[in-house]
């Protein structure tokens, strides 16, 4: 049985928002962040004619979700890529246009639970944090090689950390003695640098630094910046997209990407919409939707979620 923390976030709402685009026909949906396949499993069960294309950058997620979804047979196609490759992935599978897209951003509980991957500040583990296992720079590389300016920028932009400059100075001083390898030493440094008074409002002193390092190591915002237009580009008319973000920078990118296409391009003052200038998207959520108190109590991972959804109502311009 799944632990409560492995329950997919806002599952019922995701199913409800995607249903009009998927039900009663041989529709195709892309789960761009397959993870442990919780959302995918429920979508496939809800729509017997549905074909699902599941993407994840983490080969372990592909393997585990593959086993979980095996009972749905040939309705499931899994691809180990980052989601900014959504257009190639769907084209290669012969579905250049799809009916639904789901993006449930961030790390999975599986990744957080695996101590040796170094995502969790509560355990002393190697400072790795790569979601695509084994490729690219680790969190330790960032700490040991970045200049003061670059490190402070990463911490302040991606972690919204008020003490970014102070933390960067302390890291540079500390790494002269010995390079960083494990999270324990970094957490200790953060306890010393982040003033105790700010913990009452800001939570654990390592929370924002760990988030920032993870975003930097995985190029998360760059991947999302490329993925949003790509995902919206493969969505056919009548198709629906749902995005769940867990931090404000991601949510802001989603909000702007949707808002841009939900606007009319007909010059103001004209009595009718000019052909080809109407909105491409209709927003399905008013602002960002949050998890209910009950869901947060049952599944604390849902606490920061911001959900936005839209329907394609016009061809891409
Ligand atoms: C929050 S989990 C998804 C959980 C999933 N919805 C479920 O029900 O089990 C996010 C997943 O997205 C993957 N991921 C993160 N960034 C990605 C990217 N740029 N491209 C593809 N997958 C990514 C992570 O490896 C992780 O498995």
Image (spheres, rainbow, N blue to C red):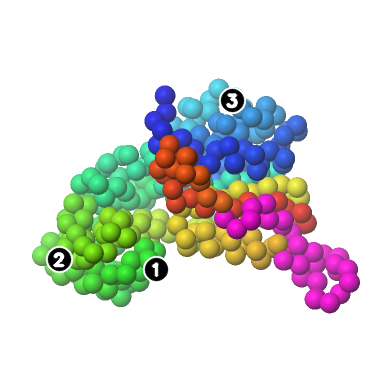
- Residue 184 shown in magenta: no
Q: Main secondary structure of the magenta part?
A: loop
Evaluate if marks 3 and 1 touch, with contact meaning CB atoms under 8 Å apart: no
| Looking at the image, residue 64 lies above or below residue 251 | above
Q: CA distance from mark 3 to mark 1?
A: 42 Å
Q: CA distance from mark 2 to mark 3?
A: 52 Å
Numbered-mark total: 3
Quarter of the image with the C terminus in it: bottom right
Residue 174 disc label = 2
Q: Disc 3 marks which residue?
A: 72
Q: Position of residue 292 (x, y in %)?
A: 51, 44
- Relative to 279, 179 lies left or right: left
Mark 1 or 2, closer to the camera:
1
For the point 63% across and 56% down, the residue is 286
For the point 65% across and 39% down, the residue is 16
Q: Position of residue 217 (x, y in %)?
A: 36, 57
Residue 117 in view here? yes
């Amino acid at each position: 049985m799944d632990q409560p923390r492995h329950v997919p976030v806002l599952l019922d709402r995701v199913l409800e928002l995607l249903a009009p685009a998927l039900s009663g026909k041989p529709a195709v949906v892309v789960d761009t962040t397959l993870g442990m396949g919780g959302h995918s499993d429920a979508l496939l069960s809800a729509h017997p004619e549905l074909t699902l294309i599941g993407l994840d950058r983490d080969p372990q997620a592909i393997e585990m979700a593959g086993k979980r979804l095996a009972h749905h047979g040939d309705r499931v196609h899994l691809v180990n890529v980052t989601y900014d490759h959504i257009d190639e992935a769907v084209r290669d599978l012969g579905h250049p246009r799809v009916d639904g897209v789901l993006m449930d951003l961030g790390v999975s509980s599986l990744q957080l639970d695996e101590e040796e991957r170094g995502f969790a500040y509560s355990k002393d583990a190697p400072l790795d944090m790569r979601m695509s296992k084994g490729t690219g720079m680790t969190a330790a590389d960032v700490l040991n090689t970045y200049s003061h300016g670059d490190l402070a920028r990463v911490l302040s932009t991606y972690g919204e950390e008020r003490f970014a400059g102070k933390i960067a100075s302390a890291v540079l001083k500390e790494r002269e003695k010995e390079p960083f390898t494990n999270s324990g030493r970094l957490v200790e440094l953060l306890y010393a640098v982040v003033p105790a008074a700010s913990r009452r409002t800001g939570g654990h002193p390592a929370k924002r630094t760990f988030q920032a390092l993870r975003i930097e190591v995985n190029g998360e915002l760059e991947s999302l910046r490329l993925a949003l237009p790509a995902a919206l580009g493969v969505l056919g008319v009548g198709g629906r997209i749902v995005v769940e973000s867990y931090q404000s920078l991601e949510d802001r990118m989603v909000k702007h990407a949707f808002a841009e296409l939900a606007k009319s391009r007909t010059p103001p003052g004209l009595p009718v919409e000019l052909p080809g200038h109407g909105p491409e998207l209709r927003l399905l959520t008013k602002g960002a939707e949050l998890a209910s108190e009950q869901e947060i109590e049952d599944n604390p991972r849902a606490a920061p979620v911001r959900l936005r959804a839209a329907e394609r109502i016009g061809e891409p311009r």
